[in-house]
Image: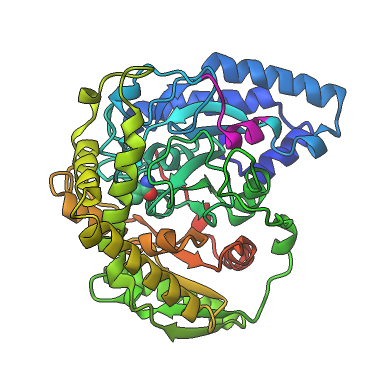
């Protein structure tokens, strides 16, 4: 079952010629055939293309064993959220507007991953245009949680999380505008990284809300997560929001755990509204880190309560303008193909930007955003890192919140402040509910300090084995 391996394990096996890239890809494809009818993680599976590529990879390895230096992800089967433009492969954004759209170019990140030798095995399901927290807003079909098929896998990167969690690939890419990597990672027992805003190029990834969109990934371990960011991170001349900030060697930073970090627990993230199982589990994880020599202190982020209202003004405003380009004239279907959620957000966003309302809504929300940013700045004077639950509740039933958008939006209360402030955060497994559903916690760091997340996260994974548990499917 090669499809169960982590990236680092698989690379070692390929290098040592224990198995071939074709065998690895075939095991993933076999597993897709076995489980994906039940899960619904993939919109497109690139069978023949990925097998062809694997054959080429095997020849490369045969003729040049040191090729892995040049191509660090060589032969790794991966999945992309179907919002990443892929040259020659259908890219739908989960919407019927783009049901038959085939992009003529690759997103920068796709280019980088391909250059590193990764094999794109398929494109994954999502809430249409990345609007959602459960995967149920996909215009095609909902994705099911591999841990319990009656539950949602989280969203909007629903298919990417479910595909990796059920070992249909070895890694997957997502986007996090308000939690869409961290929340599904926590629902599916995975590591989900939302890098600093601007750390990874957004070029070629269909925009949701441009000032919030972060490009990240799902892996089974923190070590794998660090490995992938090394490839995707860095300035891109095609995305002006990627600054020229050095990309450190992330994997090197894992080996020596930093023992004396100050880790803050923001009290607003442990409030009554958060399920007690989630709170307790994260507190236990904090205790474990304290026993390793870290200092745990209670802090307060008073602006947390403004995050949801500010986000649900700024995000629809930005997306209403981004979605204006899908006019059905140059490509894609007409605007009548937009689903209910996209229409709701377009109307909300257009309304709050319209003359006479702009000051009352958009401008006010932007002021709240500034307060949220200052709040984090203040707290990071006291601590190196924050630790908090990811979701206020465990994975919920399919259908449970779909008819109540407000309830659905409240899924994001613990994730969206981070997006508004442009900070990096990583969700990782830390336990299970009484019903055997995964619980995740998130570390939050200062801008461009992803290495701190990896350092502590890796240390935690050396002490625990929550991340090794796989669903029985
Ligand atoms: N759940 C949030 C929303 O619906 C976040 C979406 C995202 O991060 N793409 O807006």
Query: Which of the image's four quarters has the N terminus?
Result: top right
- The percent coordinates of residue 76 (x first, y second) are 64, 33
Q: Quarter holding the C terminus?
A: top left
Q: Please, is residue 313 above or below residue 21 in the view?
A: below
Q: Answer whether residue 344 is visible to the viewer in this image.
A: yes
- Residue at x-position 28% and y-position 47%: 316
Magenta stretch: includes residue 430: no
Left or right: where does residue 232 sit relative to residue 313? Answer: right
Location of residue 410 (image quadrant): bottom left
- Quick check: 393 left or right of 421? left
Q: Is residue 113 magenta?
A: yes
426, 143: nearer the viewer = 426
Measured along the vertical axis of the image, is residue 124 above or below residue 384? above
- Is 170 above or below relative to 444? above
**Residue closer to the observer: 242 or 291:** 242
Residue name at image x 50 percent, y 28 percent = 85
Q: Residue at x 65, y 30 (%)?
A: 114
Q: Position of residue 107 (x, y in %)?
A: 55, 32
Q: How many marks?
A: 0
Look at the image and name its color scheme. Answer: rainbow
Magenta segment boundaries in residue numbering: 104-114
Residue 235 in picture, x, y percent from top left: 65, 47
Q: Nearer the viewer, residue 263 or 115?
A: 115
Task: Report the residue that reaches farthest toward the left.
Answer: 403
Specify whether residue 2 is in view: no
Q: Position of residue 389 (x, y in %)?
A: 38, 67
- Kindly report the secondary structure that dominates the magenta region of the rendered protein: helix
Q: Quadrant of residue 186?
A: bottom left
């Amino acid at each position: 079952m090669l499809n169960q391996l982590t990236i680092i394990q698989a690379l070692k096996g390929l290098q040592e010629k224990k198995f071939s890239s074709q065998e690895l890809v075939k095991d993933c494809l076999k597993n897709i055939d076995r489980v994906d009818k039940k899960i619904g993680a993939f919109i497109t599976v690139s069978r023949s293309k990925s097998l062809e590529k694997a054959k080429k990879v095997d020849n490369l390895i045969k003729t040049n064993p040191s090729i892995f230096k040049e191509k660090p992800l060589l032969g790794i089967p991966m999945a992309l959220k179907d919002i990443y433009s892929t040259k020659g492969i259908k890219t739908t954004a989960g919407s019927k507007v783009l049901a038959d759209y085939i992009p003529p170019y690759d997103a920068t990140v796709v280019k980088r991953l391909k250059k590193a030798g990764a094999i794109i095995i398929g494109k994954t399901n999502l809430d249409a245009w990345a609007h959602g927290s459960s995967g149920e807003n996909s215009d095609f079909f909902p994705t099911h949680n591999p841990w319990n098929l009656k539950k949602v896998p989280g969203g909007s990167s629903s298919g990417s999380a479910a595909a990796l969690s059920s070992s249909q690939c070895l890694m997957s890419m997502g986007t996090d505008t308000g939690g869409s990597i961290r929340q599904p990672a926590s629902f599916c027992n995975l590591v989900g990284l939302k890098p600093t805003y601007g750390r990874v190029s957004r070029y070629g990834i269909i925009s949701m809300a441009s000032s919030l969109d972060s490009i990240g990934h799902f892996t089974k371990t923190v070590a794998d997560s660090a490995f992938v960011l090394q490839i995707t991170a860095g300035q891109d001349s095609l995305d002006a929001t990627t600054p020229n900030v050095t990309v450190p060697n992330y994997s090197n930073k894992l080996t020596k755990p930093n023992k004396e970090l100050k880790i803050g627990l923001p009290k607003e993230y442990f409030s009554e509204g958060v399920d007690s199982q989630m709170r307790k589990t994260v507190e236990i994880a904090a205790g474990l880190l304290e026993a390793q020599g870290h200092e745990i202190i209670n802090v307060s982020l008073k602006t947390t309560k403004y995050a949801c209202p500010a986000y649900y003004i700024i995000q629809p405003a930005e997306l209403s303008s981004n979605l204006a380009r899908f006019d059905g004239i140059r490509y894609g279907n007409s605007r009548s193909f937009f689903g209910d959620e996209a229409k709701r957000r377009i109307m909300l966003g257009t309304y709050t930007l319209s003359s006479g309302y702009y000051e009352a809504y958009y401008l006010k929300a932007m002021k709240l955003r500034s307060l949220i940013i200052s709040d984090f700045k203040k707290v990071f004077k006291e601590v190196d890192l924050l630790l908090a639950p990811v979701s206020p509740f465990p994975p919920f039933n399919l259908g449970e919140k779909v008819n109540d958008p407000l309830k659905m939006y409240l899924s994001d209360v613990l994730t969206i402040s981070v997006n508004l402030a442009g900070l990096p955060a990583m969700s990782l497994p830390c336990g299970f509910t009484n019903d055997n559903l995964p619980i995740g916690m998130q570390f939050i760091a200062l801008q461009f300090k992803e290495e701190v997340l990896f350092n502590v996260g890796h240390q935690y994974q050396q002490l625990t084995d929550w991340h090794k548990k796989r669903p029985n499917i």
